Amino acid sequence: MTFRELMERNRSRRKFDESRPVSADELTELVDLVRFMPSGRNLQPLKYIVTADPAQCVEIFPLLGWAGYLADWKGPAEGERPTGYIIMLLDKDVADTPHCDDGIACQSLMLGAVEKGYGGCIIATVNRKKLAALFDLPDRLEILMVLALGVPAQEVVLESLPSDGSIKYWTGEDGKHHVPKRGLDEILVGRFPKN
């Protein structure tokens, strides 16, 4: 799979095949990948929790917000929920802020998951207090994001922005999830030489 193919397949996935679980070993392999990524000032302040434990997955699921643009959708139904999670933490004894490390790590983790045949969703709408209590986290470990992972069970279709310029994603009657993307001509504001 080329890097472009990985990027094109790396969509926010919100429906999964629960009959095909991820393993804690595979999630640990993904975290091992991000040890090699660049880090602002090489501080490496990010820490992680991985879980593929079905009971923990059940407890984590209601602590997450799903798909803000789909206001009437409460998230994946039973049988379509993530089978694993990576919880990204900031170790405040190392740094006050993740700088840009959290973004680099999220993208790296997601690309690694796609390469393994998984998909996921990076979730920042999290009940951090309850999730921290679930794992008995010390105050120095701040929850940044949760990556919900599993075998994708919904097709995602990339489209050009509609004429009204709306960036809101939507799910069609056929069950496919549609995601409008800006064209290259809209995001590339300069090129030199111009020929």
Image: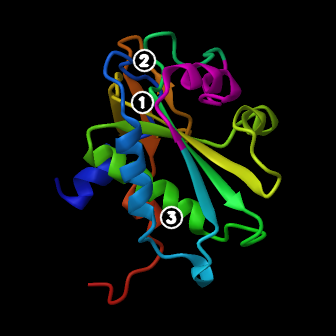
Give the residue drawn at x 61%, y 69%.
Answer: 100
Say the numbered circle drawn on residue 109. none
Local crowd size for mark 3, using a 10 Å CA cut-off: few (<14), some (14–19), many (≥20) = few
- Name which residue type carries label 2: Gly
Q: Residue at x 35, y 43 (%)?
A: 26
Q: Position of residue 191 (x, y in %)?
A: 38, 81
Asked whether, in this view, residue 116 is left or right of residue 181, the answer is left
Q: Is residue 163 above or below residue 140?
A: above
* Type of amino acid under label 3: Ile
* Classed neighbour count for the residue bearing mark 2: other residues with Cα under 10 Å, few (<14), some (14–19), many (≥20): few
Measured as percent of width and height from the top left, residue 139 is found at 83, 52
Q: Does 144 appear in magenta?
A: no
Q: Which residues are magenta?
A: 50-71
Q: Amino acid at mark 1?
A: His
Secondary structure of residue under mark 3? helix
Q: In the picture shown, does residue 37 fall above or below 106? A: below
**Residue that badge 2 annotates:** 172
Relative side of 130 to 45, left or right: right
- The structure residue drawn at horizontal position 60% and vertical position 79%, both measured from the top left corner, is 40
Q: Which residue is mark 1?
A: 178
Above or below residue 195? Residue 179 is above
Residue drawn at x 64%, y 68% is: 45
* Disc 3 target residue: 104
